[in-house]
Image (tube, coloured by chain):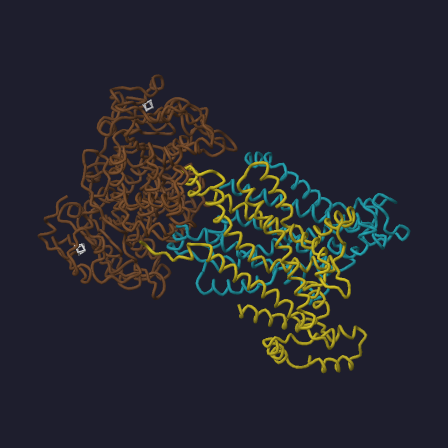
Chain colours: A brown, B yellow, C cyan
Amino acid sequence: MKNRPILEVKNLDVVYKTLTDEIVALKDINLQVGERESLGIIGESGCGKSTLFYAIMGYLPSNGNSTGEIFFKGENLLEKGQKEMMEYRGNRIAMVYQNPYSSLNPSLTIGYQLDEVTMFHRRFSRKEARKVSIQSLTDLHLGDAAGIVHRYPHQISGGMQQRICIAMALLCRPDLLILDEPTTALDVTTEAVILDIIGELKEKYDMSLIYISHDIGVVNKVSDRIAVMYRGEIVEKGSQNTIYQHPDHPYTRALINCMPRSGIVKEEVRLNTIQGYVTRRSAAETGCPYIARCEKKAHDCEKGYGLKENSPHHFSACTRAYAVDVPDRERTALKKVEENYDEEKNILKIENLYKYYGRQGKKIRALDGVTVSLDRNNVLGVVGESGCGKSTMGLTVSGLLKPTKGKLFFDGMDISVSWEKRTPDTLRGIQLIFQNPGRSLNPSFTIETIIGRPMKKLLGIKSKVERRKRIIAILKKVDIGEEYLNRKATHLSGGEMQRVALARAFSISPDLLICDEPTSALDVSVQASVLNLLGDLQQESGAAYIFISHDLNIINYFSDYIMVMYLGRVCEYGRKDEVVGPPYHPYTEALLSAVPDVDPSLKKRTIRLEGSPPNPTKKIGGCPFAGRCHRQIGEICINVPPPRVEFSDTHFVYCHLSKEEMQGISS
Amino acid sequence: MVLTLAVMSFIIFVLVEIMPGDAAQTVLGQSATPESLAALRESMGLDDPLYIRYGRWAGAFIHGDLGESLYMRGVQINTIFWRKVGHSVILALTALVFYVPLSLFFGVLAGVKAGKLTDSIISFFGLATMALPEFVSGIILITVFAIKIPLLPITSIIPIGETLWENLNILVLPALSITFVMFGYVSRMQRSSMITVMNSDYIRAAVLKGMPQGYVIFRHALKNALLPTITIIGMNMGWLFGGLIVVETLFGFPGLGSLTLSAIKTRDVPLLEASVLFITFIFVISTFITDMMYAFLNPRIRFKRGEV
Amino acid sequence: MKTMFLLLKRNPLAVLGIVILFIWIFAAFFGPSFLSYTYTEMDMDHQMSLPGEYNHLLGTDALGRDVFARIIYGSRSILTVALMTSLFSSIAGILIGFTSGYFGGLIDMIFLRIMDIVMAIPPLVLAMVVLGILGDSTIFSLTLIVSIAYTPATARVARGALLSCKGNEYVDAARIRNESHFFIMFVEILPNTIGPVIVEITARFAYSIMMIASLGFLGVGLQPPTPDWGMMVIENKSIIKTASWTVLYPSLAIASLVIAVSLFSDFVSKVMIHEK
Ligand code: SF4
Ligand code: SF4
């Protein structure tokens, strides 16, 4: 610790009482944050990272009880009453939350919500307060600050709302700023801008910072030190580089290795997986919280468990990350399947596809002329930010939406209609995996019914015995035991549910699988196993995939071809190596620069894209990206649709820049 | 709105038409001779086909003429109707003055103290009165406040030659009877909307900004928590008039409710039309006002979404 | 089961409600066989006798009829009709609300419009007008009309419950494997809306009792000589000053039943929230 600690948490335990039992949310937390220091906290959902900060703020639900000590500048916060805590909240310690929209009061103006902070803590008059508020907004690069104060939260975009929340937190120049997943609800390019601003402000205001996230990459951008939490405990802490390069704790190591990170592709590396999933912790449980899932566990590892400083400034509860008595699992790459040339290669052709929602006058142009084709055995990754039309494309291909204009061909057959008009064989041939498995499996059905029903409807297998035989076989492939047959989907974990969803899709041998953000509702440690499974199943079945995701790392890891979309249109398409390397479309360039990296040594220059995508109800004359493009070259971009520039047979870009200019862009 | 009223009025006409017995029968009683019945029907215009009678009635109605009562021969409905409507409106408003502040206050209180003893008591009371028929609470109130402690009159009849204004005390018990059931309904709604708001992210944010509890409740929570309840109160204005019928019958109060009940029993179509349409009108107009008010109080509707 | 027990332990009032409800159900089934009077029997020597006098537990009314016997008999009709109306209006509500919400678009618009029109009249006024015009209500007509009067409200609840499920992807998954609308509505969605539906049925039960009692009170409910709680109150209202027990006890009977059902329904909704 180089500086005096500003926050010191000692032996903090938090226990929640529920109707039936007691749940341990935090166990023996010891933590220090120094002056001007920035600490990042990593953990999967349910590991207690948010609870930790509500405990610090003295804001636990009534069934939660905390014991231990929390010193803030030498004062024990746990001994303070609600009245005394008011002095700290928002004044000395400020917080920023995950969801900016719901954190702002919908019926008060932005200005009002900002002003009250200094009016209370600094006893400012309304006029003085307003001046400070506007200044604070300006510090966050919010253009029209004087206008924004008169607006209501719903009139402002998500990225702006979060900047307002940060401005609000900074009004009293707090000593400590706590950010709880502040960018998780935002798009990558917006996230990048906000992370950039946070870094800048930290320098400017001399404050300490705690940044909580499930994403190491994000934390890397703003924190020097990192603490890793697992099931209510801190299992390891140390500097950014140590954590990435020499993790001591098996969990930390496994977590890093299971992330699809830049430069890693499925043809070369198979992602590491962690078996099982995070479970609740009961009061009776003692010892290592990771033992149920640990690959390195040995008979004596319970004995010495506990957080120790193993090397200077590097604490870990266990040092068996590289223990050799239990060898590392072998990680083979996925091999590409032999192409079968007897069959017609092409499986899907999309020609000039348009999809509009809503009525005349208020039409939302979700897809604005998309053309692409996909061969068997290939994975097409579709990437873009929310509202770019990638999900609409998936839904249209699956038949859940009827195209407004344009043609779809599946295996040579015209399927430009919605599901009611498709043949059972087409319905069988195209399967869909949804983002949220909890919502895609009917909670009141058993696993057997969930998988058996499509077999009966689309394969026409009438015999229950025959179906059961096949169900057991397919469940085995997705690594789910026979004993699950009669369980309801609600009793499964997220990862298991997604496996069942995969089993349902593959039980009727589809030719094309559409995966719409299949892992974004899952924890990182579970995501890897689902991705691996998706890869294995593809290899085995030879089905083609449309893989839709907002996460360029995952797309790059998993796809053969990548299509970058913006506002219902294609920006760039190509083999994955062609897309992620130069020449770039300016939007691809911005996206790539924004992607957070697990490896802290890969510091990139962020391109700050201003604003948010334009209103999708307006018809766009020129390039859809023109309003935010950092390389915009004037009127032509706004008024003339960009031409298709081809770099190879498989690689093209829609942009007014010349080939040479684009080739000149390097990452 | 107009459509609702038109459809309603037509349905009532048809209903009376397809049911056995008519006003002529009720006027003359069961022992009437067929000849006298026929004569009376003719003079009442009951022999004309349905649509002609409906058209005749509707035409006059649009011009504000509610027609002549079928049962009380020769009485213009306009002369008796509005006075009684006036009484009912006053009673309804009295009830409103009682129950709105009470249920909002206790609903908010229960919501803030959710899970505590205060909440349990208020919630139990709300639950108990939620589905309590108005006449039951009325009887209990009469027993206590008119018989055991003779404070207030048992019946709410206006003595002949006097007006309501000289007998305001007759309003208290009927209004309280309505208050009971409405309190149950509204306070429970208010409680749950208050709890939703108090658990919202923005309230958490306000508390963690260091704002004092009272300020958070009044400045941040209340407005958002009151919005849905205001809608509920507005939407239930029509229902309130349903309760009025029961209460007026219990207390013998000369209002719209007792008028409606007697119109039904005598098959007095024009009078029934006037009563039911008025109740419908109250519902429609209060829904309309509620919508306007909601839009005005809710910035999300007042200011259209527009990105900066 | 264990959580149910724990919840009951935490809600003593719910236990009270359930006990009272069971007492009433028991009284309706077996009560009459314990009575020394029938509901029409007039004790000509003891009219308006005080509760407890002359072997009349709750006294007699102006005609010398035993108030207690009439209350016990009255519980039969009100419980039967209320139970049936809450079931029928819920079933009708589910059918209408589901169809309307599931198909959406024009069908939904028409249904909503119709429901708006029906809802513009308070259910009590609607039932009163229709029953009054029909005259001489029977168990059948009473059940039918009250069910109809409550159907728009239940339909709204059912529609809301369906809409909250309809957006789930398992519905999409069912569509693209060519399931029939019927299957999706009633096999896929219905089991998942069972929570709100059950809560609605129990709450509707309380409101049905309220409505039936009120209709009886207004004189358009079941006709004499069938004893009806509401009717007992209005019949004897004029003698409230001299023989308050004749109106007070039937009122208390209604109150106890209504409150018991409300407590029960509140408990059911707590259980449903907990199930989630
Ligand atoms: S090696 Fe043992 S102590 Fe270390 S993490 Fe694994 S199970 Fe826990
Ligand atoms: S066409 Fe113009 S605005 Fe569009 S991406 Fe190219 S340079 Fe940017």
Q: In which quarter of the image is ligand 2?
A: bottom left
Q: Up-down: is A463 above or below A294? A: below
Q: Where is residue A144 in the image (x, y as percent from the top left)?
A: 29, 51
Q: In this view, does B106 lie above or below C98?
A: above
Residue C92 visible somewhere in the drawing: yes
Q: Where is residue A150 in the image (x, y as percent from the top left)?
A: 36, 52
- Quadrant, the N terminus of chain A: top left
C116 or B209, which is in the foreground? B209
- Position of C218 with respect to A82 (left or right) is right
Image position of A603 (left or right of C10): left
Position in image of residue C85 (x %, y %): 63, 55
Residue A102 position, x and y percent, is 40, 45
Q: Which residue is drawn at 72% across and 75% down?
A: B75
- For this rendering, which residue is in front, A278 or B260? B260
The quadrant where residue A401 appears:
bottom left
Which is more toward the observer, C212 or B69? B69
Q: Quadrant of residue A480?
A: top left
From the image, which quarter does the C terminus of chain A lie in? Answer: top left
